[in-house]
Image (cartoon, grey):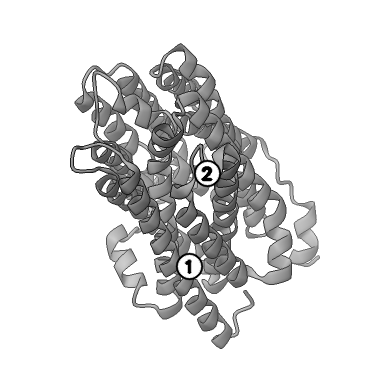
Amino acid sequence: MTTEQAQPTEKFFTPPLIIIYVTVFIDLIGFGMVIPILPFYANTAPFNATPFEIGVLFAIYSLMQFIFSPILGRLSDRYGRRPILFISLLGSAVGYFVIGAATTLFMVFLGRVIGGITGANISTAQAYIADTTSRANRAKGMGLFGAMFGLGFILGPAIAGVLSKYGVHVPFFVAAVLALTNAIALYFILPESIKPGAARVRPNRLVELVASLKQKDFGMINLLYFLLVTAFSIMTYAFVLFTAHRFGYNAEQNGYLFAFVGFVSIIGQGVLFNRLTARFGEARLTIAGCLMMAISLFFMPAIGPAYGGLVGLLVACAVLSFGNSLASPAVTSIVSKISPEEEQGSSLGIMQSGASLARAVGPMIGGVLLNNAVNQIDDASIQRTFWTASFIMLVALGTSVYVARILRSEAQPV
């Protein structure tokens, strides 16, 4: 029997995989609960954080992830995925609790730092899936991982919106309880996926990123993904402050808006992406997605109660989310196709390293732009913030066109 004939009979939904998917789903609900609430929380008494400080709050989490995820990754190679997942979930619980119980802005920052340092659970969960699936089923496994990721981001903001009625700090405590419950369940029922002591050599993350830029095709794709994530991170940080200033929306209403963005992303990535890829190819979808994101980011600051209203805001959000749901997985798929089989894990890891750095850079840029001379947000600062994100996406659009030409010249089937 050939390998191709054996593939359909291979069991996919094993108990360990089911457990890890539930773990990711619950973890992302907790993470998704924080995104629309954090700007409101930090902006109120006793913290009274400025737009710049809120940008740093967003950035510091991703910066800590960028620095410490490779360390935890090496530890997971040596000592196993299970203990690192357990520790990272405990760290998330502690981080959420510190933020919820904070009485000073320093404590809010401390909670974000703790969460970022121990926030390697997503990459470690991906490694667990890679450990327990064959190459034939790996794409299916990662696709389902993405679906759990997206569903968590739909339910998380919506739950946060409901919970915020009882206090803006309540979602942080609930997220802490979810992470702690998840850690306990994982400790008792998740089996280990690798043998202890089977360490792999992992080069420095920043060195890998710089080295990747020397490769014409892979370097340009990495640059494209970095720009895409940077622009989207600027929007993620600025959106809540924008809707609060322009529409007077509170934490509950923003939670529902983020849930809507997540829903559109699920439709785009989970339902339409494969069909569109089969018809148009990843390179064209990347170009289309970048264009949609650039347009939506450009027009979003013009939307308000007197121009477009809620309908206009939802349309802009839908276009942005759908564009991202086309471009992001398309770029990932391109990297997977151009990388040799033995280097796929390394290539995708380098790309995600760039994305982690972009999630730190984006809010920092947004924090500087959204903060006016008196440490407040106004119409001019909103405009320059979203237009900067739009310009970044225009650069990404040009890069995506260049990447498509490179791939055509090398006869890559994308």
Where is residue 11? Give x, y as percent: 74, 46
Where is residue 48? Give x, y as percent: 24, 25
For residue 81, side relative to residue 135 (left or right): left
Three-letter amino acid code at the position of disc 2: Tyr
Q: Which residue is most to the front?
A: 306
Measured along the vertical axis of the image, is residue 414 above or below residue 291? Answer: below
* Residue 204 seen in render: no
For residue 241, side relative to residue 18 (left or right): left
Quadrant assignment for the C terminus = bottom right
Where is residue 266? Give x, y as percent: 64, 45
Nearest the eye: 84 or 122: 122
Measured along the vertical axis of the image, is residue 37 above or below residue 16? Answer: above
At horizontal 79% and vertical 55% (from top left) the residue drawn is 8
State the mark number for residue 343: 1
Crowding near the residue tagged with mark 2, few <14, some 14–19, many ≥20 C-alpha atoms within 10 Å: few
Which residue position holds label 2? 307
At horizontal 48% and vertical 60% (from top left) the residue drawn is 294
At horizontal 57% and vertical 35% (from top left) the residue drawn is 259
Where is residue 340? Give x, y as percent: 52, 72
Q: Earlier in the sequence, mark 1 or mark 2?
A: 2
